[in-house]
């Protein structure tokens, strides 16, 4: 188990809704907004917003994570945007 | 002392609540991935494309469909999680 996998849920939660850079093994790097960290596998789920209004989701597996650096804090608008990505259909807000 | 066993032990309520919230969002993410074309980044720089199927509870393997390999398209396959570094897919 690496240092990232040994963290507690309370540690992982401090990364949620923040823009991070993940350094993974074999010199891979990933950047995006943290949606969640799976407490079972320590996999980190990142979202990046593309120009065509699509969202790209990247999941870096816990065993491959070496270091996670926080680049930016998310404001309330970003938190709201992130919380809608995986929300079940019925809880999505509808505009008139 | 797997993470699931630790969760079973409970521990303090605050950590347990946070663990549940993190896991719930992760599971919703898996549900969102189902049926989507996904690129898996494996060890040694290997990249493969497949349609995401499911993951098991202990994060041992991913089940995928239409795995494109150099030898052809595999209708259904399991990818070992230890071989996968990352995977990504698009939501619209």
Image (cartoon, helix red, strand yellow):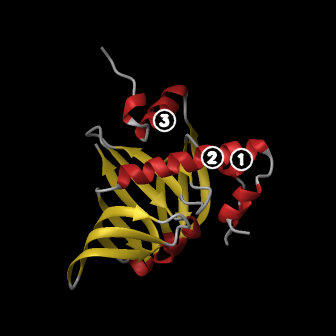
Which quarter of the figure is the N terminus of chain B placed in? bottom right
Where's residue B43, x and y in %? 44, 78
Question: Where residue A83 is drawn, which disc sits there?
Answer: 3
To which chain does the residue with label 3 belong?
A
To which chain does the residue with label 2 belong?
B
Where's residue A49, x and y in %? 37, 42
| Residue receiving disc 2 | B20
| Residue receiving disc 1 | B16
Say which quarter of the image contains residue B55: bottom left
Disc 3/disc 1 C-alpha distance (Å): 20 Å
Disc 2/disc 1 C-alpha distance (Å): 6 Å
For the residue carrying disc 1, how many other residues have a C-alpha within 10 Å: few (<14), some (14-19), or many (20+)?
Answer: some
- Above or below A53: residue A37: below
- Does the residue at mark 2 contact the one at mark 1 (Cβ under 8 Å)? yes
Say which quarter of the image contains residue B42: bottom left
Instruction: State the residue at coordinates (69%, 51%).
Output: A9
Badge 2 and badge 1 both on one subunit: yes
């Amino acid at each position: 188990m690496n240092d990232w996998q040994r963290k507690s849920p309370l540690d992982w939660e401090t990364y949620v809704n923040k823009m991070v850079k993940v350094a993974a093994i074999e010199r891979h790097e990933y950047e995006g907004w943290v949606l969640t960290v799976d407490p079972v596998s320590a996999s980190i789920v990142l979202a990046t917003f593309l120009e065509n209004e699509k969202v790209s989701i990247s999941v870096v597996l816990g065993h491959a994570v070496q270091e996670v650096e926080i680049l930016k804090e998310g404001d309330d608008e970003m938190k709201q945007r992130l919380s809608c990505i995986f929300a079940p259909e019925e809880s999505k807000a509808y505009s008139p | 002392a797997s993470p699931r066993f630790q969760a079973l032990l409970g521990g303090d309520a605050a950590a347990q609540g946070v663990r549940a919230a993190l896991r719930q969002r992760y599971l919703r993410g898996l549900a969102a991935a189902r049926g989507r074309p996904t690129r898996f980044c494996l060890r040694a720089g290997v990249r493969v494309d497949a349609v995401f199927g499911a993951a098991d509870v202990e994060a041992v393997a991913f089940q995928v469909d239409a795995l494109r390999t150099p030898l052809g398209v595999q209708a259904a396959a399991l990818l070992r999680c230890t071989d996968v570094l990352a995977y990504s897919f698009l939501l619209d």
